[in-house]
Image: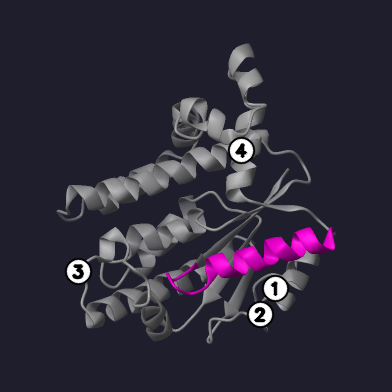
Amino acid sequence: MSTIVEFMGLPGSGKSALARLLLAESKRSGSCAWLPSDAALVRCLRRRNDGVLRNALKKLPPPAWESLFGSRHTLAELTRFAGSHPALFAFVFEVLNRRPMPLDWRTCILHAFFKKAAERLLMDEFLSSGEKVFVEEGFAMGVFTLLDGLSAPPGEEDVQRYCRHMPVPQAVIWVDVDPAQCAARLKKRIELPLLWAGCSAAALLDRLSDGRRCLEIAAREIGARNIPVARISNPDGRLDGVWPSTWQWVLSGMASGSVSL
């Protein structure tokens, strides 16, 4: 079985930065070759049998063939995933139908879940034992995508139901940062995510605070499923004193349960 480690955390918490540091350390040390999710997906798509001609074309660099029969063409994987996780999809649509929302919001949320589903199925089917992947936007993060702002604040029962039905990774790295600090970092970005477009500063902070509560419950529920959760603090946004201990936790096999690093 492959090893999938997912990140979760508020926007602006430093998930992507921490993932890059861990991947760079993996490459530098040569101790164990971890993959980012996009590289893992290319590997899976190349291993998928798409016929003699397409399989031959996949020996070329991904830009030459990805748009023709790559990750956009994963209906079969999405169908198989949905068939094996009907309760998860039923819950997603139940939440989306609780109140009216703009079509582009609904489309954005569904696209995120369909993408996660197809990618997870590909990894489960085509990654080999010993291959290891860091996933920045997996199903652990999906609880925030689905529940943030749809029930204010997110209800504990909803988070529990989501975590009960989601496919679990081998471990989760939770970058836990104060919502006010995340809000300050987000203000420096060119634009906010679609679902937050037009939020006032006060509304954004409320959304982030609700989101942090949602992730805190999710971390507890994921841990209750015997999935190790590393809780990382990143108050200054630099990660200087964070990533070495996180890397050591990864090297140790992530077998120590839920820990704070």
Q: Are marks 3 and 2 in contact (CB under 8 Å)?
A: no
Q: Which image quadrant for residue 18?
A: bottom right
Instruction: Report x, y in % for residue 101.
Output: 17, 54
Label 2: which residue? Answer: 242
Measured Cα–Cα span from mark 1 to mark 2: 6 Å
The residue stretch that appears in magenta = 9-30
At numbered mark 1, what does the secondary structure look like: helix, strand or loop?
A: helix
Q: Nearer the viewer, residue 113 or 60?
A: 60
Q: Nearer the viewer, residue 195 or 58?
A: 58
What's the residue at 50%, 59% (across, down)? 140
Measured Cα–Cα span from mark 3 to mark 1: 36 Å
Label 1: which residue? Answer: 246
Could you tell which of marks 3 and 4 lies nearer the N-terminus?
Answer: 4
Say which amino acid is labelled 4.
Answer: Val
Furthest-left residue in this view: 100
The label number, if any, that marks residue 113 in the structure image: none
Label 3: which residue? Answer: 198
Q: Is residue 247 above or below residue 202?
A: above
